């Protein structure tokens, strides 16, 4: 289950360099970047700090310089092989200021992650422009942007660039920004009250920097906030607030909105477009009625054609109503177009702005021209079309509103995960004897590592922790997908966000805040949703040239129709009454501009990815990135590790046999337990558990489960082994004292004395015995053959080059394993089993599973090589399913690594998919959901391409010659808006995904279940 591994291994870890305790200068002779801190005297105003800053920036070898006027200090990062600290000091002194070196430290190569909310991104061209700007910055190692979430995740070196510089770069590209968070997971933001000047912020900053465990502090006087980075193992949010309040200032936690910022931004976006739609409808509906309805009513038309200053009433009213729609309500599009053009790019805003401005400007010029002709005594019909401009903006705004509403639903899975976190926790105060002296309900953000918390029945557990008192059932289905409540007793771990079902428990917090399992799952899902699948690169390349191509097509359309009209290439009666060649052609050109939709292409992949990864998380499957999901669709070979993956991973000793007559069985078990005590291998643990069962009395039963418990932490009965050597895939060698037990005192061996013999014990498989030169007699071979024929694994124990006895160990298959293998083969996959077991046992287990392709007696290091050989031989996608440390190289080598949730941290880190449960059926679900998601992406692309291929010619007038059908520009704009909405709605259909029918049920219902085992 998920509570046996650390979700932190799923995310990138960054290491923090240790600083010298005395702050003294370090040896920088080896080169590299170094940061020097200097105190500066003589600065009196902002121009002083600017002068110093400019002088430092001009020095060779300076990578970053920051001068603080209020703190009278400077921090300068420089390349030590190019410039010395005294040169920096002399440069400041030459300007007339005093400078003194306070300390130096080499630049840490630590990477941090900044999450930034970005406003104004409308299409993939915007994302590409921001990524290009960020890639040129020194210190930025990776930048990933999400058009849907309107966020950027930027990895950077804090000593080379600051979050403020990242924000400034994005803003200079023409977008709005807001920093959601920077640094590592242990970051707290405070609202600080009572600061009046720079000395206040400096005092707070100095006090916090002096606190144990605080890594970095940034206090802003202007915003009255502080951001503190700290080691949660040494200090917590309550301690930090106590430091600030101890100085006489007010301090409170700012709501950590980094995880929920996406939700609030989407709500803000929805409100923004809803207001746009409402206001535009108030103005554009009357314009539409005047142009399309009232102008054709006989009596009303006469009144509308009344002249006022040379203009008709109809013209004036439409002009007045359209102007605020065009330049106030529609300013968002014009501003976006200007930003794009300044960057030298073109996006959807450029198309909308050009189309609406062309319609509006032509309508104004047409009205002015008609008035001038009216003054000359020439009356012509109104040739303007203000309704096109107004309705275009209205329909596109409506489409944007529907699109934002639909996009919000694509991330509903993350929203539901966020809602699992409780808002408060019951904090216990305990005395030295462990008795509770006080209880206090506190915000969950103030819970610190090591706190004792009370979880009553029915309440959510506020933090990851360890049960210290009480027993209960905990419902973990909302996090792990496990439907059955899990028994929890003292010593067991619990997960934040899960529900305590029955009795009260006292929990000691081990991970809090952003470090909890729930928070890490949310981060992992969000990171996967922000990643780009390789297939999206095709859409990005098309989007980069889409708008310029459409501009060219639009101009060619207008020019073609205009020239054709002037040259008489078509009958004059094609031109409507009151129109002319220019206006007739212009309507076709504008329709082409506004009907083309680059947004549909840009949204095809990310919307499907967001819904798909969210659905996977709800089904207990964590996908680490979009590229992994794409690779899953190409898998044709599935390799399964045997122990812990196909089997339950809980092997038990089913038989023991001593070949040396008269050798005490108790001594045999003691020797085996001593040698295997330090082993992490499941077979070694099975041997130790078997010895414990026979050599230690069972302890009291579990009132909840009704099963006997054994205290696995009690190892006092195990003899001490020396020079123990674990040999991967073979066994263990160790020196152990031979000490016979007294009859009747099997649980209490006599202490070893100098007279007792210390013997070298070898315990392992055939291969280890052969390496040690230990002969296997006929009796031993016959026993092993008999047990292996029954599917057991034999472990031999030898001393003095003689086999003393053997353990027969079986690991039962998971009930769903046979059905999963059969289902995968029905999906067209070849199944392989790889194991370190002997060939006899491996073949028997494989026969039970219906697996023909077996790789046995494979050492851990050889598993990755087996994967590589299959990749080279078959040239197909290879998936590796495993759970142990030994599987991690193979998981990393495979095209798709799938780690079982009950596995080790290192295996989970190496995998692309993580199954939060130990249920093999989730392998089927993971592969099936991946293929379903990518089918949806293909559908989205097909719709986006077909829409543009059909609608652009239609708008250009390809049907006008045979049918005399001209698509009005405002209808074209509405079609464009709805095309984006349709792509998002198509992706939302993934929420209806249903996992494949349980293979266990299919197995039980099958009339002849053995028929499932067929040849591949």
Image (cartoon, rainbow, N blue to C red):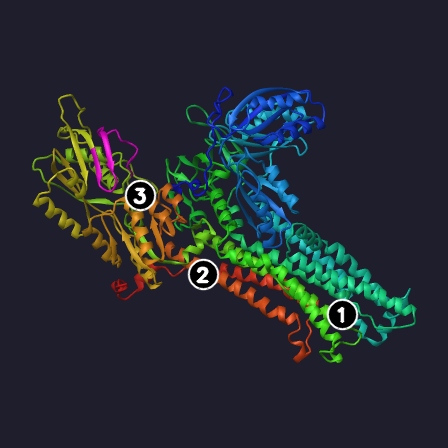
Of residues 26 and 552, the one drawn nearer to the viewer in this rendering: 552
Task: State which tag comes first along the sequence, 2 or 3.
Answer: 3
Q: CA distance from mark 1 to mark 3?
A: 74 Å
Q: Is residue 178 visible?
A: yes
Identify the disc placed on residue 949.
none
Give the percent coordinates (x, y) of residue 321: 80, 61
Q: Are marks 1 and 2 in contact (CB under 8 Å)?
A: no
Q: CA distance from mark 1 to mark 2?
A: 48 Å
- Mark 3 — residue? 886
Q: CA distance from mark 2 to mark 3?
A: 32 Å
Name which residue lies at 13% across and 50% down.
Answer: 786
Task: State which tag comes first along the sequence, 1 or 2.
Answer: 1
Magenta part of the protein: which range? 709-733
Q: Which image quarter: residue 737?
A: top left
Of residues 443 and 890, the one drawn nearer to the viewer in this rendering: 890
Q: Is residue 785 left or right of residue 278?
A: left
């Amino acid at each position: 289950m998920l509570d046996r591994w650390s979700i932190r291994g799923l995310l990138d870890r960054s290491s923090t360099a240790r600083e010298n305790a005395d702050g003294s200068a370090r040896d920088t002779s080896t080169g590299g970047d170094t940061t020097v801190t200097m105190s500066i005297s003589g600065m009196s105003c902002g121009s002083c700090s600017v002068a110093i800053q400019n002088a430092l920036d001009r020095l060779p070898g300076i990578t970053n310089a920051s001068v603080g006027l209020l703190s009278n200090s400077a921090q300068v990062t420089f390349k030590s092989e190019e410039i010395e600290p005294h040169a920096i000091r002399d440069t400041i002194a030459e300007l007339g200021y005093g400078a003194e070196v306070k300390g130096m430290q080499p630049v840490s190569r630590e990477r941090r992650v900044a999450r930034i909310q970005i406003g104004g991104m409308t299409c993939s061209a915007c994302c590409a422009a921001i990524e290009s700007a960020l890639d040129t910055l020194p210190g930025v190692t990776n930048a990933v942007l999400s058009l849907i979430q309107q966020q950027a995740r930027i990895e950077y070196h804090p000593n080379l660039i600051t979050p403020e510089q990242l924000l400034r770069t994005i803003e200079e590209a023409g977008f709005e920004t807001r920093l959601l968070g920077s640094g590592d997971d242990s970051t707290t933001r405070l609202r600080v009250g009572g600061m009046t000047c720079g000395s206040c912020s400096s005092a707070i900053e100095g006090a916090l920097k002096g606190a144990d465990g605080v890594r970095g502090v940034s206090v802003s006087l202007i915003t009255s906030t502080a951001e503190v980075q700290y080691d949660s193992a040494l200090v917590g949010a309550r301690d930090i607030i106590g430091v600030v309040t101890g100085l006489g200032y007010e301090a409170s936690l700012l709501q950590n909105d980094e995880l929920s910022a996406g939700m609030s931004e989407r709500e803000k976006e929805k409100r923004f477009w809803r207001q746009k739609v409402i206001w535009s409808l108030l103005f554009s509906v009357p314009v539409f009625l005047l142009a399309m309805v009232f102008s054709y009513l006989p009596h009303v038309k006469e009144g509308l054609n009344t002249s006022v200053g040379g203009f008709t009433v109809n013209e004036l009213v439409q002009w007045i109503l359209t102007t605020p729609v065009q330049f106030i309500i529609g300013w968002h599009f014009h501003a976006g177009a200007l930003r794009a053009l300044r960057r030298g790019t073109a996006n959807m805003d450029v198309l909308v702005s050009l189309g609406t401005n062309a319609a509006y400007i032509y309508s104004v010029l047409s009205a002015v021209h008609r008035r001038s002709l009216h003054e000359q005594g020439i009356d012509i019909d109104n040739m303007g079309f203000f309704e096109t401009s107004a309705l275009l903006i209205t329909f596109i705004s409506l489409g944007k509103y529907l699109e934002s509403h639909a996009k919000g639903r694509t991330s509903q899975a993350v929203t539901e995960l966020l809602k699992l976190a409780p808002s408060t926790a019951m904090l216990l105060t305990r005395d030295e004897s462990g008795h509770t002296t006080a209880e206090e309900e506190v915000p969950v953000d103030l819970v610190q590592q090591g706190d004792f918390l009370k979880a009553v029945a029915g309440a959510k557990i506020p933090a990851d922790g360890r049960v210290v008192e009480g027993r209960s059932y905990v419902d973990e289905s909302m996090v792990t997908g496990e439907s059955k409540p899990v028994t929890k007793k003292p010593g067991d771990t619990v997960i934040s966000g899960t529900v305590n079902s029955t009795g009260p428990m006292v929990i000691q917090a081990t991970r809090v805040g952003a470090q909890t399992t729930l928070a890490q799952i949310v981060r992992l899902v969000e990171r996967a949703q922000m990643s780009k699948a390789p297939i999206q690169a095709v859409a990005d390349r098309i989007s980069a040239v889409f708008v310029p191509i459409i501009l060219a097509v639009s101009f060619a359309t207008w020019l073609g129709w205009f020239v054709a009209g002037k040259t008489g290439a078509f009958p004059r009666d094609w031109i409507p009454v009151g129109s002319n060649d220019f206006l007739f052609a212009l309507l076709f050109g504008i329709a082409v501009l506004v009907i083309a939709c680059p947004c549909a292409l840009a949204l095809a992949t990310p919307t499907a990815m967001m819904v798909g990864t969210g659905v996977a998380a709800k089904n207990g499957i964590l996908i680490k990135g979009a590229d992994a999901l794409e690779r899953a669709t190409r898998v044709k070979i599935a390799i399964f590790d045997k122990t812990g993956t196909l089997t339950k991973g809980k092997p038990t000793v089913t038989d023991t046999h001593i070949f040396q007559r008269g050798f005490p069985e108790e001594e045999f078990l003691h020797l085996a337990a001593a040698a295997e005590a330090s082993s992490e291998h499941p077979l070694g643990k099975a041997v130790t558990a078997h010895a414990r069962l026979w050599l230690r009395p069972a302890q009291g039963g579990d009132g909840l489960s009704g099963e006997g418990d054994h205290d696995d932490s009690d190892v006092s009965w195990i003899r001490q082994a020396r020079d123990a050597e674990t040999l991967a895939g073979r066994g263990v060698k160790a020196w152990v004292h031979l000490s016979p037990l007294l009859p009747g005192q099997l649980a209490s061996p006599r202490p070893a004395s100098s007279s007792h013999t210390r013997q070298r014990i070898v315990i392992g498989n055939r291969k280890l015995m052969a390496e040690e030169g230990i002969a296997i007699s006929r009796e031993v071979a016959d026993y092993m053959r008999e047990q292996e024929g029954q599917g057991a694994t034999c472990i031999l124990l030898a001393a003095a080059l003689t086999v003393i006895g053997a353990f027969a160990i079986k690991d039962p298959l998971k009930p769903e394993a046979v059905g999963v293998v059969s289902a995968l083969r029905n999906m067209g996959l070849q199944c392989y089993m790889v194991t370190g077991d002997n060939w006899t046992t491996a073949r028997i287990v494989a026969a039970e599973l219906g697996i023909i392709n077996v790789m046995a007696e494979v050492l851990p290091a050889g598993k990755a090589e087996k994967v590589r050989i299959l990749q080279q031989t078959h040239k197909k996608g290879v998936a590796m399913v495993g759970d142990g440390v030994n599987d991690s190289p193979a998981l990393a080598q495979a095209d798709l690594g799938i780690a079982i949730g009950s596995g080790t941290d290192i295996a989970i880190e190496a995998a692309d998919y993580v199954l939060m449960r130990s249920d093999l059926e989730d392998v089927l679900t993971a592969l099936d959901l991946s293929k379903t998601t990518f089918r949806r992406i293909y559908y989205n692309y097909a719709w986006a391409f077909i829409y543009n291929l059909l609608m652009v010619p239609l708008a250009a007038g390809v049907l006008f010659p045979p049918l005399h059908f001209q698509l009005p520009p405002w209808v074209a704009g509405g079609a464009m808006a709805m095309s984006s909405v349709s792509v998002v709605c198509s992706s939302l259909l993934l929420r209806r995904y249903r996992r494949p029918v349980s293979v266990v049920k299919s197995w039980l219902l099958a009339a002849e279940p053995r028929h499932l085992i067929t040849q591949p």
